[in-house]
Image (spheres, helix red, strand yellow):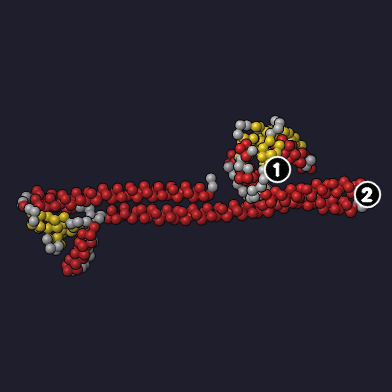
Amino acid sequence: MKSSHIKIFFIIAATIGASLLFYYTQDTVTKIRERQRQAISLWVKTLKMVIVSDSKELSYIYSEIITNIDFPAVLTDAENNPVTWRNVPLDEADSDTVKIKRLRELVAQMDKAYEPVAVKIGDTLTLQIVHYGDSSLIKTLQIAPLISLAFVALFFFVAYLSFKYIKQSEESNIWVGMAKETAHQLGTPISALMGWLELLKIYIGNPERQSQIIMDMQADVNRLNRVATRFSKIGSNGELKLENLAEMVEGVFNYYRKRIPNMGKNIELRLLEAGDVDVKVNRELMEWVLENITKNAIDSIENGQGQITAKLTDEERFVCIEITDSGKGIPSKNKKDIFRPGFSTKERGWGLGLSLAKRIVEDYHHGKLILKDSAVGKGSTFLIKLRKMLN
């Protein structure tokens, strides 16, 4: 998954989560406020009954109702002079005058939030008025979404820094790997050319031997030209041409057949099912992919004896190349990382070969490069799938 897709996923998930939290909080606040209104209504009704009756039972019920109110409330007379109150923050050390002033200020604030409820006898005579406000629970619930948003913002900030660090680390690995890969690709033919120059000096006066050396030098110059062409095509929209995959695979295998003996190994390279399997590719880049996979296969055969096979299949929508080796295999814990830039299990590995191969196949050719199968001690199989629609 691309980093941009991950960011979009987190943004959508956070938005949905924040919306659900906001909805749940508002729904809870609405229910609590409804219970407050019901408690105020019961208070007013009971107060009316107490006023018109001297029943001790009603007085007891009224006191119980007042005691169980868990939100700020002030009972005033018709002129808004405080009579009694509950859950109102007052400093007991203040004088009565200061307390009354503070209560009147609180009453004014409560009336802005909720309409006061009058205790009336009949339709016109107002005896007392009940003023009330939000409980501490409602106030806490109202700021809960803000706190959650702050945590979400903090999460996104940390995630952004993490993604930025990961991206910078990957870019650094790619740049270092590219530099080393360039040095590696150029190093072999350059070293060979230096050796040929020394041989030319030795065989001065031997035209036949010099002619052979010049032919070998031409091969290394061609190799240098291919390396330069490959690097120049990375990131460009080069032309794709119809190529015979069997010829390409056999050409790469022949290249390594000449070099395997110098590695101290006896490895058989075989092309199994071939035929005329043609597909549009960039030959230089696709050969680079095949070389990287084949070189990894050779390196995985540590006991010096083994086999590498290639199988070409022509399917309905894809042309497939399977490259199988009898090497040491890939542990399960490493399978998900083998295409990551900078990852390598080799002591002198740079971790760019498979990453570069995957990019060439998938970004440049719109195909697929996957590890089809691997078992420790038995070997690995890589699968390249190239779309026919490009033809």
Instruction: State whether residue 384 appears in this view.
Output: no
Q: Check disc 1 and give the amino acid type.
A: Arg
Residue found at x 14% / y 56%: 118
Quick one: SS at disc 1?
helix
Q: Check disc 2 and give the amino acid type.
A: Asn
Which one is in front in this view, the residue at disc 1 or the one at disc 2? 1
Q: Position of residue 250 (x, y in %)?
A: 74, 37
The residue at which mark 2 appears reads as 206
Residue found at x 16% / y 55%: 117
Residue found at x 16% / y 56%: 130
Left or right? Give the position of 343 relative to 28: right
Left or right? Give the position of 110 relative to 379: left
Return the disc, 1 or 2, that comes first in the chain's sequence. 2
Q: Position of residue 222 (x, y in %)?
A: 78, 48
Numbered tag placed on residue 283 in the rendering = 1
Quick one: SS at disc 2?
loop
Q: Position of residue 126 (x, y in %)?
A: 10, 57
Q: Residues within 10 Å of mark 2 (few under 14, many from 20)?
A: few
Residue found at x 14% / y 62%: 80
Left or right? Give the position of 57 relative to 209: left
